[in-house]
Image (cartoon, rainbow, N blue to C red):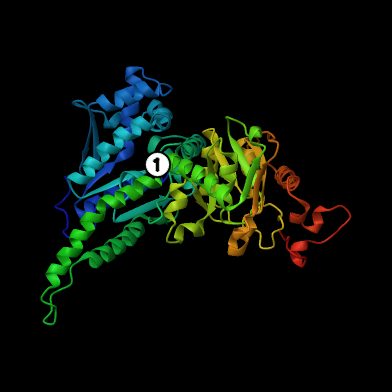
């Protein structure tokens, strides 16, 4: 067992990161230093995998897996290291076996299995000060942990570590690491992702002592921040009462923080989305002359990317109201999540993207949505038009379409540029969504620049073909050069 916990230190501590990034090594060292329990949550999923393989329950039978997870006599004994028991049998030594390694990602992606394991992990965290290491600790298991650490390392470094641990050659270790990364990052339930408030450390060339030194500084800062101020002669006589009141307020707000975390994982987003969609359709009929055409062209199933021009911040819900048949998951600029009402786009089902940047996390999220047969919404221009004219699309949309092989549905939105003017609203503006013909894209695992460029141009042409001429810049008209956005008048209404 670890030493007695040091009073005043933050707990629990959440450590996340991809395979072989150093989570267990760092977690064990921190737990030993601070006197905390250490739980390697990945061993719990490995133990379930071992039990499922023994019982002949395949990962292609989620119902049987969920039933097994609910009844499995699995015990995680956290101390200075983690030992896993199935009943009275200590199976810790069997959890790195090749057959477990090859199957653990498939079993751990099953929602019912993860739900059962997460409940047991939280019990350990609540039993005593603890360090938990895994892939969803800071985002799912312990979203309110005071200290979250996200460890990364290059694929080469992680493959070398895994090869040394399991006596594999470098090529095989790298294939295993690459496959595990892809599976962990794209699974629908609790994918590997960094919590927004987590400290990210690249351990590729960083020795363990340097990592620990960095974390010690962070722990000391958190401990100092949470320590009560020493009493002074000039302190107000009611200071203890005020401190107690603040502590009571924090406890009272804890359920609200948990509810906020729940919203982030999409439990209520479908209901919120459809309520907003039909309310918006009613509002549009009241304040404007509203119509949507071509709804019969919307594919009823399968992965779909909705693309449109962009005139106003209200465009995403208005396009969704026009399509109506399927829920759209929109990419939304990351800046929206910093505003006072930043919880609304998340609750609505949107997810953040850093525009004009290689935002790998957003790309993976988009591909997960399409892999699940859902609808992804994108504005290929990347921002609202400042002139009213449609702008050239950026290649990100085409890249996602090629990598996923999803169907592309072009749309045009007309009239929403008037919504920023109260006088125009009083005149009941004409607002419409025009839905074009969908077209399929051949899936390409590694698209070339030419393929991306060609599809980007095709998307641009499909959108502009649906728009009235007043929205088109001069370079879209035959025989003309230049761009109206560089000096022409914006389209009037």
Q: Residue at x 45, y 49 (%)?
A: 346
**Residue assigned mark 1:** 268
Indicate the quadrant where residue 421 lies: bottom right
Residue 153 visible in the displayed image = no
Q: Residue at x 30, y 52 (%)?
A: 257
Front-lying residue, 458 or 342:
342
Front-lying residue, 137 or 153:
137
Q: Position of residue 288 (x, y in %)?
A: 60, 52
Q: Residue at x 25, y 53 (%)?
A: 254
Front-lying residue, 293 or 118:
293
Residue 428 visible in the displayed image = yes
Question: Looking at the image, is 424 positioned above or below residue 327?
Answer: below
Name the outermost residue toward the top: 56
Q: Position of residue 267 (x, y in %)?
A: 39, 40
Q: How many marks?
A: 1
Question: Looking at the image, is 311 positioned above or below residue 228?
Answer: above
Q: Position of residue 161 (x, y in %)?
A: 42, 43
Question: Looking at the image, is 89 positioned above or below residue 330?
Answer: above
Left or right of 221 on screen, residue 396: right
Left or right of 339 on screen, residue 46: left
Name the outermost residue toward the bottom: 234
Front-lying residue, 415 or 108:
415
Q: Position of residue 88 (x, y in %)?
A: 18, 26
Name the outermost residue toward the right: 479
Left or right of 88 on screen, residue 119: right
Q: Which image quarter is the N terminus in?
A: top left
Q: Which image quarter is the C terminus in?
A: bottom right
Under circle 1, the secondary element is loop
- How would you rate the neighbour count of disc 1 (Cα within 10 Å): few for under 14, some for 14-19, many for 20 or more? some
Indicate the quadrant where residue 201 lies: bottom left
């Amino acid at each position: 067992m670890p030493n007695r916990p040091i009073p005043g230190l933050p707990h629990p501590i959440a450590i996340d990161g991809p395979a072989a990034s150093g989570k267990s090594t760092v977690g064990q060292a921190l737990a030993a230093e601070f006197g905390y329990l250490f739980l390697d949550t990945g061993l719990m999923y490995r133990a379930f995998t071992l039990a499922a393989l023994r019982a002949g329950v395949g990962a292609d039978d989620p119902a049987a897996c969920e039933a097994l997870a609910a009844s499995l006599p699995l015990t995680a004994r956290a101390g200075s290291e983690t030992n896993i028991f199935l009943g009275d049998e200590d199976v810790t030594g069997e959890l790195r076996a090749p057959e477990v390694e090859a199957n653990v990602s498939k079993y751990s992606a099953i929602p019912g299995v993860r739900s059962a394991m997460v409940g047991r992990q939280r019990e350990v965290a609540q039993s005593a000060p603890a360090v938990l290491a895994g892939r969803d600790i800071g985002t799912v298991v312990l979203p309110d942990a005071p200290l979250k650490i996200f460890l990364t390392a290059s694929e080469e470094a992680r493959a070398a570590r895994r090869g040394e641990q399991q006596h594999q050659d470098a090529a095989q270790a790298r294939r295993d690491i690459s496959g595990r990364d892809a599976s962990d990052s794209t699974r629908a339930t609790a994918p590997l992702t960094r919590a927004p408030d987590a400290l990210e450390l690249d351990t590729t060339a960083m020795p363990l002592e340097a990592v620990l030194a960095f974390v010690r500084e962070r722990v000391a800062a958190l401990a100092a921040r949470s320590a009560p101020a020493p009493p002074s002669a000039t302190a107000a006589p009611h200071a203890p009462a005020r401190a107690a009141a603040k502590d009571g307020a924090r406890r009272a707000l804890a359920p609200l923080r948990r509810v906020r975390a729940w919203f982030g994982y999409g439990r209520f987003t479908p209901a919120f989305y459809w309520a907003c969609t039909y309310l918006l359709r009613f509002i549009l009929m009241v304040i404007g002359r509203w119509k949507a055409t071509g709804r019969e062209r919307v594919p009823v199933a399968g992965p779909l990317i909705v693309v449109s021009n962009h005139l106003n911040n209200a465009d995403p819900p208005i396009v969704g109201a026009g399509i109506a048949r399927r829920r759209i998951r929109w990419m939304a600029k990351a800046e929206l999540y910093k505003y006072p009402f930043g919880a609304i786009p998340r609750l609505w089902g949107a997810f953040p993207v850093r525009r004009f940047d290689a935002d790998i996390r957003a790309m993976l999220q988009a591909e997960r949505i399409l892999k699940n047969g859902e609808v992804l919404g994108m504005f290929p221009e990347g921002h609202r038009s400042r002139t009213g004219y449609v702008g050239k699309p950026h290649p990100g949309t085409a890249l996602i379409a090629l990598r996923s092989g999803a169907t592309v549905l072009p749309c045009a939105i007309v009239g929403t540029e008037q919504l920023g003017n109260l006088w125009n609203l009083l005149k009941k503006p004409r607002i419409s969504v025009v839905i074009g013909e969908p077209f399929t894209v051949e899936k390409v695992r590694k698209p070339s620049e030419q393929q991306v460029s060609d599809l980007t141009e095709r998307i641009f042409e499909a959108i502009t073909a649906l728009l009235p001429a007043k929205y088109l810049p001069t370079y879209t008209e035959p025989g003309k050069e230049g761009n109206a956005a560089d000096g022409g008048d914006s389209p009037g209404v």
